[in-house]
Amino acid sequence: MPNKASPDQTFPDFDAPIPNSWEGGEPGPHETVRRIGRLRFAAPLENIFVSQIREAQRSFLFIWTVVALGIWLSFAGIDVIRYLPIQDTPQASLYEFGIFFPRGLLTLILVAFLLALHKRWLGSQEVYVAMLVLLLMGLAAFVTVNVSRICHLPQGESAYLLLVAAAFFPIGATFYEGLTLAILLCVSAFASGPIMLDDPEMLASHWRVCAMTVLALVLSAVSGYMREYALREHFLLRRFLSWQANHDPLTGLGNRRTFEEHLSRTLAYAQRHRDFLCLAVLDVDSFKQYNDHYGHPQGDRILQQVAKLINSYARRPLDLSARIGGEEFSLLLYGANIESALNRLEKLRSELSNLNIPHVGSLETGNITLSIGLALASSIDTPATLVKRADDLLYAAKNAGRNRIVSQTLV
């Protein structure tokens, strides 16, 4: 019996990993779409998404910090005005320690954070430091509001709502990070009352504000969830369209466009660093006869099976397997000289032979086989000249009887 690929392996099967595609072999688009509702992709894709939104929203983080500093300074100005009538009363010392001190300390922290953002001193930790700064702002705000209550002065209780909403501002944090921060702010707000207040009337007012804070948390969380859901949908759409533009839909390997772009970059890199680079062009022997006898659907399954095998030999980061024609494939092997490339390709050809896939139209073996042309890049090669040499060697392999490798050292 031939080792056939089952029909459910035909690309696109979005429930299976896409070969030679998204980093890390994470699940395909349909599986990933099912994860959008949880706002969590598989680990490799999640890391890419998070790093992209962190970089894309960095400008918002800077704006958020400037706005936060402006609001904080405006409250500080109000604090000074409210202090004047009580500066000679017993409440003055409490006011100075409970309001001026936290207000001044957080002003310095915000200014330092703004400078760190401008100089990019924090690197990838910027978002986490921003969350810590917001949490400290919340603690300071809760203290100042409760001190104002004790001093029987007007309180800026709206700060509670602003702080919770700010946790979901687009500063590069994920929804779950923002939700965690908002919950911590709510818990801190709740706890500040019983710790600082002992008057029942003041506590009643405190609980009313806390109830409004929870409502603000729910509304802000819903808005944050919907925004991130839309971001993830847009991210997936761009990524999948990019994948489609650069990959062969039948086999999942890189297409000719990907091959040409990668070859151009890799050849220049190899020449600059004086590294080996081999290009193999592989062709399924007598494939037209196979299609005529077994039918195109079965022919497509064979191409998928051959492509999977070829892709398994693209093992290094700069290696690439691609489908560049109907039954023609390429395998770019970086850092491999002719001898090591020949050994790998002989193993590939041997592995295909061991599958014993019947092909009655093949007069040589009666099975599916490959003819391969192998060329080693030189210091003066261009992508076009390297491809032409590999193609010429492939035709030499065909003319010599198929089911063989011809390299430039043997011609």
Image (spheres, rainbow, N blue to C red):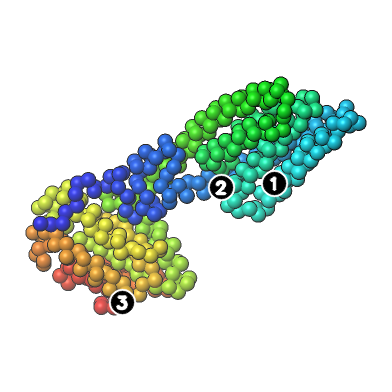
For the point 40% across and 60% down, the residue is 262
Label 2 and label 3: CA atoms lie apart by 44 Å
- Helix or strand or loop: what does disc 2 sit on? helix
Q: Quadrant of the C terminus?
A: bottom left
Q: Is residue 33 or residue 238 the one in the foreground?
A: 33
Give the image location of residue 52, x and y in percent. 51, 47
Is 305 left or right of 279, judged from the image as shown? left
User: Can you tell which quarter of the image residue 172 is in?
Assistant: top right
Q: Residue 275: x and y, percent?
A: 43, 73
Q: CA distance from mark 3 to mark 1?
A: 57 Å
Q: Disc 2 residue type?
A: Glu
Q: What SS does tag 1 mark?
A: helix
User: Label 1: how many residues lie within 10 Å, few (<14), some (14-19) or many (20+)?
Assistant: many
Secondary element under disc 3, as helix, strand or loop, is helix
Q: Which residue is mark 2?
A: 55
The residue located at (32%, 50%) in the rendering is 18
- Cα separation, mark 2 vs mark 1, equals 16 Å
Q: In the image shown, does 384 or 283 lie closer to the viewer?
A: 283
Q: Can the viewer see residue 394 in this picture? A: no
Q: Is residue 45 above or below residue 148?
A: below
Please report the residue visible at 16 percent of the width from the left and 65 percent of the height from the top. 354
List the residue tagged with mark 3.
339
Q: Earlier in the sequence, mark 2 or mark 1?
A: 2
Front: mark 2 or 1: 1
Q: Where is mark 1, residue-wise?
A: 114
Q: Is residue 271 visible?
A: yes
From the viewer's perspective, is 260 left or right of 308?
Answer: right
Look at the picture and state if 101 lies above or below 216.
below
Q: Are marks 3 and 1 in contact (CB under 8 Å)?
A: no
Residue type, label 1: Leu
Front of the two marks 3 and 1: 1
Q: Say which quadrant the N terminus sits in.
A: bottom left
